[in-house]
Image (cartoon, helix red, strand yellow):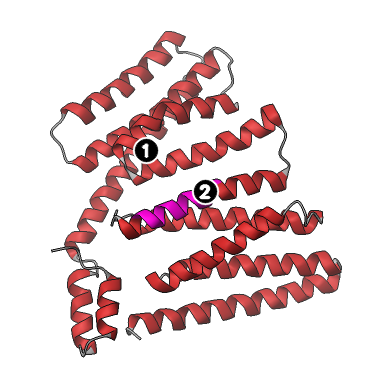
Amino acid sequence: MEKIDREDIMITSKHSNRSKKQIESLLEKYIYAKPKDWKKFLDLFLLTLGLGFVVSGIVFFFAFNWAELNKFIKIGIILLLLAASIICAIQLRIKEIYKKMLITAASMLVGVLFAVFGQIYQTGANAYDFFLAWTLFITLWVIITHFYPLWLLFIVLTNVTIVLFNEQVSNNFDSISLTTLLFFIDGLALIALLTLNKYDKADIPLWFRNALALAVTTIATVGICFVIFDSKLQQGTLLICGTIAFYLYSIRYALSNKSTFFIGSIAFSLLIMINCIILEIYNDDIAFLIISILFIMGVTAVIKFLLNLQLKWTNGK
């Protein structure tokens, strides 16, 4: 039997004579988190936090003892930890999730290794090629492991690499062009993710979907604000059209999947854009007063709308 999700229960509630109590019982049985689910979440959260502290401790160890360590010791320690992480992930008979966490820790250690190497031989630890090499060397692990925290790291590294390459090498893109490029890269990745989740039942975590959606919405908002303040409507046409198409797609997805997060992020994005337009048109003290009033009213209206919408969906209407 396939896993029953919230959408299945909501659909059956509309086309059946189930009572509200029966619907609530189904939600309790199949949807709401149980004590064992919270225990599993806490186990994974604490383990992830522990791995993060270990990697952070390694970074601070090198930062504090940098002058006293021989360069071969510096690189050797990182290589030893990196090899140990990979060997443990392959050889130990542990749960699959723990193996994926070890691979994620190893991916972070790859970045530490390149940073240490760049500091020793002065190749630069903040150059675009540092992040490019980091991204390329973990790409195979990302694809094979298929672990969403690792995917998030990969997406962040890809964006940082593009931004630094433009700043340090090509310098061909201005702020509007760069945000347009990042918007389409991340936006297409999110759409592909949602499509995969719809047709292949990939069981993509909610936090990953929302994090990527928030990133795309933020990039679109910042880019259109650049268009407004720089008065470059023609140059920003592609970004504006892409943002409109993405927002329409996101609203349709949100309504069909009962996601208030998408609607809320889009609403706040549009509110910021409207305030930027007012500020650009008037550009005086009155404009700040109008923006403050509109922002307070807009936030209140959005929150009230989201609460009513969530209440409606919860009651299965």
- Specify the quadrant of the image occupied by residue 129: top right
- Residue 122 in magenta? no
Residue depicted at x 55% and y 12%: 121
- Mark 1 or 2: in front is 2
> Residue 136: percent from the left, percent from the top?
45, 28
Q: Quick one: 217 or 180, which is closer to the camera?
A: 180
Determine whether the residue tagged by mark 2 lies in a helix, strand or loop: helix
Question: Please, what is the three-letter code of the amino acid marked with disc 1?
Answer: Phe
Question: Badge 1: few (under 14), some or many (20 or more) residues near its Cα, within 10 Å?
Answer: few
Q: Nearer the viewer, residue 41 or 19?
A: 19
Apparent side of residue 227 relative to residue 269 in the rendered image (left or right): right
Residue highlighted by disc 2: 186
Q: Does any portion of residue 24 appear in the rendered image?
A: yes
Q: Which residue is mark 1?
A: 53
How many other residues sit within 10 Å of disc 2, few (<14), some (14-19) or many (≥20)? Answer: many
| Left or right of 163 in this view: 215 | left
Considering only vertical position in the picture, is 54 above or below 212?
above
Q: Is residue 66 visible?
A: no
